[in-house]
Image: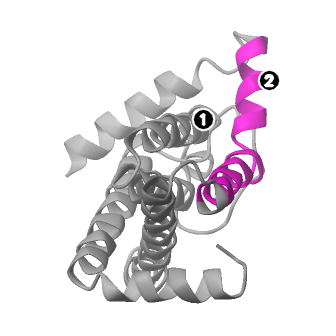
């Protein structure tokens, strides 16, 4: 375990060591790393998927993608908040090392990286139903996770762990949605009955 921690720290220090050497990259990372840009973009994509109506079949698949993403996000949040965080705390990189920080100093556990958990849960939920949009969201999720490491907020294994939890949660929700297909169908019918779908 010590070897893994050392490798994790070395990769972090190498990535974070680039801060200040490429001002244009630092500016981009400061935009991406924020609590707003990626979550808002992903939310807008989910909103567009919910209401976009190219064909009725595509519309139904996209609405299931949104349900899958929201369910995966909920399950992942429960796992992190109720199971992992109460049992394990890892200090942030800026606590353990002299780093170049491009973000404020969060006080919660570094593992797992909550932003990576959220982003990968949403991307996976969408990808399982709409590969093209899901692939774009995966790209955004990777960018979001890497920016958090580069910016000094998380170790690489924190974002890998968060991504794994998000992916697993959305896969689990997908199994439920496919096994109990009547539940999402009912939710979609109810939403459409009140002109929300």
Label 1, secondary structure: give it.
helix
Prevalent SS, magenta region: helix
Query: Foreground: 37 or 184?
Result: 184
Disc 2 crowd rating (10 Å Cα; few below 14, some 14-19, many 20+) is few
Task: Give x and y (percent) for residue 24.
Answer: 77, 13
Furthest residue to the front? 55
Say how the picture is coloured: one colour
Q: CA distance from mark 2 to mark 1?
A: 11 Å
Residue 171 drawn at (x, y percent)? 28, 65
Q: In the figure, is residue 110 to the left or right of 196?
A: left
Residue 165 seen in render: yes
Which element type, helix, strand or loop, lies under badge 2? helix
Decide which of 140, 161 is in the foreground and name it: 140
Q: For the residue carrying disc 1, how many other residues have a C-alpha within 10 Å: few (<14), some (14-19), or many (20+)?
A: many
Q: Which mark is residue 65?
A: none
Q: Is residue 101 visible?
A: no
Q: Identify the residue at image location x=62%, y=39%.
A: 152
Which segment did they paint magenta?
Answer: 24-49
Can you say whether 163 is above or below 18 in the image? below
Residue 4 locus on image (x, y percent): 24, 43
Tell me the residue that label 2 is attached to. Answer: 27
Residue at 52 percent across and 53 percent down: it is 119
Q: Residue at x 66, y 61 (%)?
A: 51
Where's the C terminus, which quadrant? bottom right
Vertical relation: 12 (above or below) 112: above
Query: Which of pointers 2 and 1 lies earlier in the amino acid sequence?
Result: 2
Q: Which residue is mark 1?
A: 147
Q: Was residue 119 drawn as part of the magenta stretch in this picture? A: no
């Amino acid at each position: 375990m010590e070897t893994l921690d050392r490798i994790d720290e070395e990769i972090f220090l190498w990535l974070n060591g680039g801060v200040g050497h490429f001002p244009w990259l630092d500016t981009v990372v400061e935009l991406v790393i924020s609590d707003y840009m990626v979550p808002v973009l992903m939310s807008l994509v989910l909103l567009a998927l919910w209401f976009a109506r190219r064909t009725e079949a595509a519309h139904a698949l996209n609405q299931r993608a949104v349900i899958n993403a929201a369910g995966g996000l909920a399950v992942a949040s429960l796992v992190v908040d109720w199971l992992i965080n109460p049992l394990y705390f890892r200090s942030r990189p800026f606590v353990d090392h002299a780093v170049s920080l491009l973000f404020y100093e969060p006080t919660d556990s570094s593992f797992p990286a909550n932003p990576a958990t959220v982003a990968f849960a949403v991307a996976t939920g969408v990808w399982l139903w709409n590969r093209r949009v899901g692939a774009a969201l995966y790209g955004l999720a990777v960018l979001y996770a890497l920016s958090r490491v580069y910016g000094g907020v998380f170790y690489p294994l924190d974002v890998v762990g968060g991504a794994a939890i998000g992916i697993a949660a959305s896969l689990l929700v997908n199994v439920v949605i496919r096994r109990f297909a009547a539940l999402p169908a009912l939710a979609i019918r109810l939403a459409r009955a009140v002109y929300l779908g």
